[in-house]
Image (cartoon, rainbow, N blue to C red):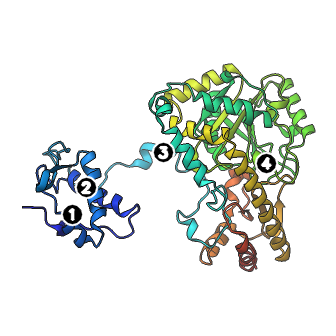
Amino acid sequence: MAIPVESFFLPQGASGTLQQRIRQMVAEGILSGRFRAGDRMPSSRGLAQHLGVSRITVTLAYTELVSSDYLTARGRSGYYVSEGVPVQPAFRPVARRDDRVDWAAVTGGRFSAQPRLDRPEDWRAYPYPFIYGQADASLFDHQNWRLCAVQALGRRDFETLTADYYEQDDPMLIEYVLRNILPRRGIAARPSEVLVTMGAQNALWLAAQVLLGAGKTVALENPCYPAFRGMVAQTGARIVAVDVDAEGLPPEALPQGVDVVFLTASHHCPTNATMPVARRNALLRAASERNFIVVEDDYEFEMSFLRPVSPSLKSLDAEGRVIHAGSFSKSIFPGLRLGWLVGSEGFIREARALRGQVLRHPPGHMQRTAAYFLSLGHYDTLVNRMKAAFRKRRMAMDEAIAGNGLTVAGQGGFGGSSFWMRAPEGVDTEALALRLRAEGVLIEPGRVFFAPEAERRNFYRLAYSSIQPARIAEGIARIARAIG
């Protein structure tokens, strides 16, 4: 007896081709134990008629399942569930009961309680998404990224794909970072001074863990990227918030006894201020005189399209006091999760050892795919395309913001992908953001960027990296009407 065709159905809304969905349907039936070894599958004609698909689609799916040893073909007899498929264990999981562990008491909520930016998971469904850091599918080079990924899957790169690098990185990616990425920032480094990370956030976490601990004092910009505060708090170090001005963090405002300073010099987060070279040199003099370390988050360096970029802090550093963190998240796409740390060998040695204890190394296939994408020139083409698009969107934002009487608190003079906005006193932008969602508009309330002891509720951020230019004017108009 064959398995009845009524046992098979294709769920609505599932992803993948029909052939892939049929393979998944059969495999899940086998792995769940509904279909057992030796059971005969429905004929390809019968299953095709039942599912409303072509017979060749079912035949090809069966052929793939045979190659994966889920099915076996027996001449004219048909297809059967393979004898070698995994068998469900005889025991069954214990029925779910009420969870009687007080996890809030056990964990202390040390991590989930940290403030963070909140955005709906289905943000793409909103017509006016002024949210930061997401990729725009209309700008990304899908075809060449796919070709690079396929190339990285080839036999020539088999070791790169499958080997455990232990604590090392893909030498091809390191070479490109050394020859092309860092020189644009004025940085000269050796391979032993560079570490590949899982994005800039992982890079900054590694730096915080290596440099800080109980008894240390760290200075953070105020306002700043919220995750800075959370990752520094994990170390037990004392946090001092230093208010920024139109030129970023003022070195003269740093307190005595500071051990480490975290800052975003190229584009301050979230105000977009760029620290002038004179101030950068003043900060480095202060670091030398007072013996502290500077961690530079190379935030949005590639998105400087209004003026030529400034040299990085690391490029001006003559004493090895600057740790430089960068990422491909904004210039390629955030889901890539590839970044880097640059610092003196002694620091990188410790950061590499810590990374090895936590996650060994970023996936080899992703490193090699990125290396091909960069080395073949696709990266530079993508960055140039993004700069041109962001320039046009910024002009549209400028015009709409001015036309609707909204107040810009910080926009920077070099580019970037967002505006830092200030609403009238008394406006709570978290409540404003909830009202705007009902109108299809997403904004980022500013409270989480400020130190808890100095929080401000009337600031908000408007990014233009993910919104189509034609929708900017109407989206800004809706924000203005909601503010009143």
Q: Residue at x 53, y 25 (%)?
A: 167
Left or right, 83 with respect to 184, comes to left
Which residue is painted at 50% across and 27% down in the image? 357
Residue corresponding to mark 2? 62
The image quadrant where one finds the N terminus is bottom left
Identify the element where label 1 is drawn.
Answer: helix
Res 233 visible: no
Residue 210 coordinates in the image, percent (x, y): 62, 28
Where residue 108 is drawn, which disc sits there?
Answer: 3
User: Label 2 is placed on what type of residue?
Assistant: Tyr
Residue 400 position, x and y percent, is 81, 73
Q: CA distance from mark 4 to mark 3?
A: 35 Å
Work out whether residue 264 or residue 310 is closer to the camera in this orientation and state it.
Answer: 310
Q: Mark 1, residues whose alpha carbon is within 10 Å: few (<14), some, or many (≥20)?
A: many
Q: Which mark is residue 44?
A: 1
Q: Mark 4 or mark 2, which is nearer to you?
A: 2
Residues 100 and 235: in front is 235
Q: Residues within 10 Å of mark 3 (few under 14, many from 20)?
A: few
